[in-house]
Image: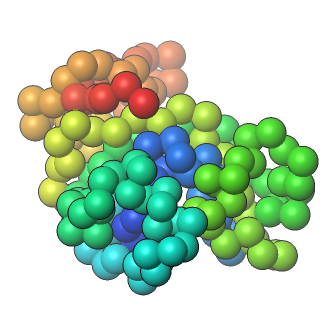
Amino acid sequence: MLAISLWQPWASLWVSGRKVHETRHWRTSYRGWLIVHAGKRFDEAPSSGDPLCRLLIAEFGPNWATDLPRGALVGLVHLVDCVPTRSLVGDVAFTEDDSLCGDFSEGRYAWRANDFRKLQRPMAYRGAQGFFRIAPNIFSAANIDPPIRIPGPVATKDIDTISLNLRPT
């Protein structure tokens, strides 16, 4: 299964659903479930009066900067589209919250997700730059439930059930 590392707080915001689009300088043709890994690095914290800071407090509480996990798998998103950021003007999926959570400048791409799943217990894991692969049995091997169905490794017609401990968003 594919995964991607993001710095905090972006990783947790994406799996929470407050961030619908992840913005990158490169496009992707990948569509489907993507595991989100929170890197060990934390992006610069916004000032207390910043609207992004208010969003982070509302979503994760006043201690978000110390509470958000690092160096761990934090959830999954279902990636459904990748569009140039300039095309988001007037898009109903591009909310005010979402606009605070990315770099939507010219020449960048917005990766749109439409389903967001947080792990109740983040799972320590070493990430990597760009996309990286994680064995599909990682969650079941760690005894994390309930199930989500993802494509199995043998054939596209086969489906593996992987146990994830997911909190509804």
Rendered-image quadrant of the N terminus: top left
Coloration of the structure image:
rainbow
The residue lying at 21 percent from left, 68 percent from top is 66
Q: To which quarter of the image does residue 48 belong?
A: bottom left
| Of the pair 31 and 96, the residue shown nearer to us | 96
Residue 23 x, y percent position in the rendering: 64, 64
Q: Is residue 92 left or right of residue 64?
A: right
User: Is 44 situated left or right of 67 in this image?
Assistant: right
> Measuring 68% from the left and 60% from the top, which residue is drawn there?
99
Task: Tell me if I can see residue 105 in this picture.
Answer: yes
Q: Position of residue 167 (x, y in %)?
A: 30, 29
Q: Residue at x 61, y 34 (%)?
A: 114
The residue positioned 64% from the left and 54% from the top of the image is 98
Identify whether 126 is placed above or below 18: below
Q: Quadrant of residue 110?
A: bottom right
Residue 164 placed where, x, y %?
Answer: 25, 29
Splitting the image into 4 quarters, where does residue 4 fall? bottom left
Is residue 127 at all visible to an observer of this figure? no
> Which image quarter is the C terminus in?
top left
Residue 108's place in the image compared with 57, above or below, is: below
Q: How many marks?
A: 0
Q: Is residue 30 left or right of residue 89?
A: left
Query: On the picture, is 152 further left or further right than 138?
Result: right
Q: Nearer the viewer, residue 157 or 10?
A: 10
Q: Nearer the viewer, residue 28 or 72?
A: 72
The x, y position of residue 155, in whole percent, is 46, 25
